[in-house]
Structure formats: C-alpha cells, structure tokens
Image (cartoon, rainbow, N blue to C red):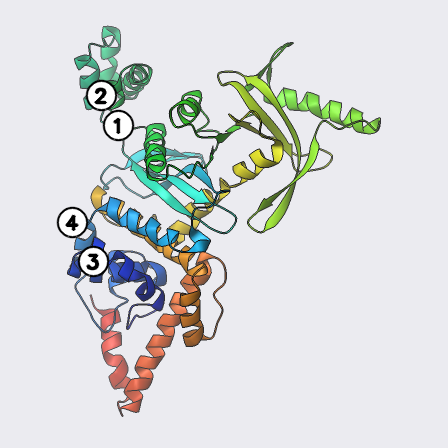
Amino acid sequence: MYPLVEIPELVQHYAPSFEEVFSADAFVEFQRYVSGLIVSENKSIDGINRLFVVEGRNQSSLNRLLTESPFSLEELNQVRLQLLDSLPGTQIKPKGVLGVDDTLLIHYGQDFEKIAKLFDHVTQSYVWAHDLVTLHYSDDETDYPALFQLWEPVELEKVEAGLRAAGIRLKASKELLKESEPNKWRSYVLGVWHRQQKKQEEIRGLYDNKLILVEKMLAQWVADHPRANLPVTFDNWFTQPDFCCFLDQELGLAYVGTLAGTDKVNLKTGQLPLADFAARLKQEHLAALSHAKKPIFEHIRIPFKGTHETYYSYCNTHRLHTFGRQRLVINYRQADLSDTPTYYLSNRLFWHAPGITRIRRHRWPVEVYHEEGKAEGLDQYQLRDFRGIQRHVALVAVVYSLLRAAQHDPALHTRLQRILHVNLEGHPAAGRRAAQAHSLWCLGLFISAGLAQGQSLRTILAPLIQAMCRV
C-alpha cells in the first residue's frame, strides 16, 4: 500500500483533459479513483479510499462516482481518445490495426447484475463472469482500447415475445421444454432468433450477441474515423462467414481472420481439411528442397513492435468452405516445418503473406491489454450495479490509456525526471511504478516538512496511521 498525500504527478498532468466530463465534485473523485487504480494493489472502492491519508473522505463519495454521477461514458471515451490523438506516439497511424477479442471478468457468486455462467477456455470450466468485448488499436509504437462494451445476457422472454410479435411461429412441441429443460428451450429460441435476424432488422434488435456488439463498435469507429481505413483482425471464434461478409460488404474494411485445421478448402480434387492440406504442402515443400527446387513455403520476416519475426509461409487464393474466395496463408515458425501451423484468411486477394501475417500479429496486444488491464483492476470491482461496473471498466481503460500516453509525452518525462531522477521505460507497468515512486516521494516530503517545522515523527505519522486503520 502506497499512502497518498496528494494526487500523483501522472494524474495531475492529464486530469485537466477530463474536467469537462464531470461536475466539480465528481472531478475530484475521478482523480482519486484513477490515482487509486494506478497506485493501489487493492482496487476496491474501500481500498482506494484508504490510500488518501491526509484528506480523508467517506468511501460513499467514490461509490457515487460510479453509481450516481451523471457523467457520460461516451463523452469520457471520446475525451480519452482525443488525448491519445494529441500525442504523435499514440496517434492513429497508416499501418495501425484494429484487433477484436473478449475476456471474462470472473467473480465468485452470482450477486452481480447481469452476470452469467460462461465457459472459461483457460480452466475448461463454467464460471460466473461478465464478458468484456474490446476493439483494440495497435501499431508498432503503441496500443490501447479503442471501443469496448460489456456483453449483456439475453432476455429470453423479450426475444420470445419479439419473435411472436413478428409472426414467427415457435414449435408447439418445443414449448414443453420451457419447464422441463429450460436450457434446451433457450437454445431453441436463440437458434430461431439467429436464423431470423438475418432477414428482419426488428428481430436483430431483440438481442446483441458478441458479434453484433463488435459490428456496432466497428460501424461507430468507421463513422468517427472515415479516413483511417484500418484493417481488422480476430481469432477463430470471431472468424464467421456472416461477420466477415459484414466487414467486407457493409463497412468495406479489410480483415485478417483465423482458421482452424478442421476448416475446409475446396480444391479441384475435392474438399480437404486445412490440416490435411498443410500436411500435403509440407511434403511437397520438403521434396522440392531435396531436389533444389523452389520451396512451397517462403521464408518471410515481418516487423512487430520494434523487432522482426521469421515465418515460413504459403500464400495463395482459394475457395474456403462457407467463406468463398479468400487469400489463404499457412504459417510455420520452424524452418523444417516441424511445429504446428497457423491458418489465416483475408478478403484482400492481392495481399501477400508478410502483410497478412503482420496484421494478424497485431491481434496479440488486445490479449495483453486484457491481462495488464486486470492488473489495473479490470476484474477487481465489488460493485453489484451493472451501470457502476461499466463505469469502473471505462475508468480502467482511462488508466491504461494514461499509462500509454505517458510513454510518449516529453513534457511528463521532463517533470518526472526532475522529481525522481529516473527515466520512464516504454511500457504501462513502468508508468505505474513511476506513479507509485512519486507517491513515495511526496510522502517523504510530507514527513520531511513536518520534521522541519519541529513536529515529532509520532505527531506527523499519527493521522496517517489513523487514516490507514480507519474502519
């Protein structure tokens, strides 16, 4: 725990950009909350409130920031992105990429609004969690969340009523499942909704699944950044024909998706799983090398975050089952092709393996953000209210963005260097440590000033100890 006797320099530096978003009282609590998310190991409202040992306040003030203050999340996010756009290092760049991913914010117990029992691929079990869907910007200098949204569980009764109102009949034989096997009834109703939402807009509006959330975020991004024209990349779960078609036909965006070895390619000789197709190409490649002929897999190098990575790539245009004509890339990391290959597809048929691989590589930073964001408190909320949880998530995104901005801000570097005599390293964790170090420095100055005024150490520390130990 790092007791705070004043707002950390990093927060003081950037807070004025956000002042217009909040009322005067809420702006004070915003600075306190963001400071606590950066400095404290305990990201709960109580843990953050205990940090402020000089100006003690009731934790209800911080709680009201998340549950009652009338600030707009849309305006907060807009100001956050404007701040990042004001620094050359964090501005959107021509070779930037938008990555799509989601992560589970796991909690024990179901006493949280709109929490759901979801499958966790890490533990291979079902857990109580909220699901955060993120559209993440990345280039070789920086990355940060662009847009994000918490997925909300389906309101089955609303969907059922909407289907009936639209004249869509639900099978009477399935109605019995509603009482006897509710999970099967839910799957049936959602299956009907999924088929019908492609045909009728009012049916689509009954429920936002994760793909629809991403489609809405991307549509908003394109509307807000009409000249950016950034490619989008995503993992196998999001690589679905309807989603790819939406990106290509509705938004006109280039994409790089991810396929599994079980996905199929249509060849003149018939349909073949990609794993079998890669194995065939591998044998042809090794045979070509043994006869000093042109290899099937080309040696390529791609830039990524200041380094270069090597791959052995096959790239060609194929018809992929359910996707149509796509640019297919198969990558190995080992020269002898002994490792497990990865499979990518793109709607840009003139692109080559290095460009497609580089774009797909920029999906990884969104996973890093989800992990580092959890270190900043992304999943450490104790609020039960869904609106409050949404605001907590948005404020964590602010923290991550401030730490990213700090890496590329010479003015802030100069101020921290003057105070701490240390150089700010190029990653968010370094900014967090610098904020903690500044807090320690301010605490030392506070104690030093008291001693210079003739106060005893016990007198100086007594109110701090009481504040830290208060109930």
Which mark is drawn over residue 159? 2
Mark 4 element type? loop
**Type of the residue with mark 2:** Val
Q: Earlier in the sequence, mark 4 or mark 2?
A: 4
Q: Residues within 10 Å of mark 4 (few under 14, many from 20)?
A: few
The residue singled out by tag 3 in the image is 62
Q: Earlier in the sequence, mark 1 or mark 2?
A: 1
Image depth: mark 4 or mark 2 in front: 4
The residue singled out by tag 4 in the image is 70
Q: What's the CA distance linking mark 3 and mark 2?
A: 37 Å
Q: Give the image quarter of residue 156.
A: top left
Q: Give the image quarter of residue 420.
A: bottom left
Res 138 seen here: yes
Mark 1 element type? loop
The residue singled out by tag 1 in the image is 154
Q: Earlier in the sequence, mark 3 or mark 1?
A: 3
Q: Quadrant of the image for the C terminus? A: bottom left
Mark 2 element type? helix
Query: x and y percent of residue 354 in the render?
Result: 61, 36
Residue at x 49% of width, y 18% of height: 323
* 445 displayed left or right of 168: right
Q: Nearer the viewer, residue 412 or 366?
A: 412
User: In this picture, is 295 found above or below 468?
Assistant: above
Res 41 seen here: no
Q: Quadrant of the image for the N terminus? A: bottom left
**Type of the residue with mark 3:** Leu
Query: x and y percent of residue 398 in the render?
Result: 33, 53
Q: What's the CA distance linking mark 3 and mark 1?
A: 31 Å
Query: x and y percent of residue 273 in the render?
Result: 59, 18
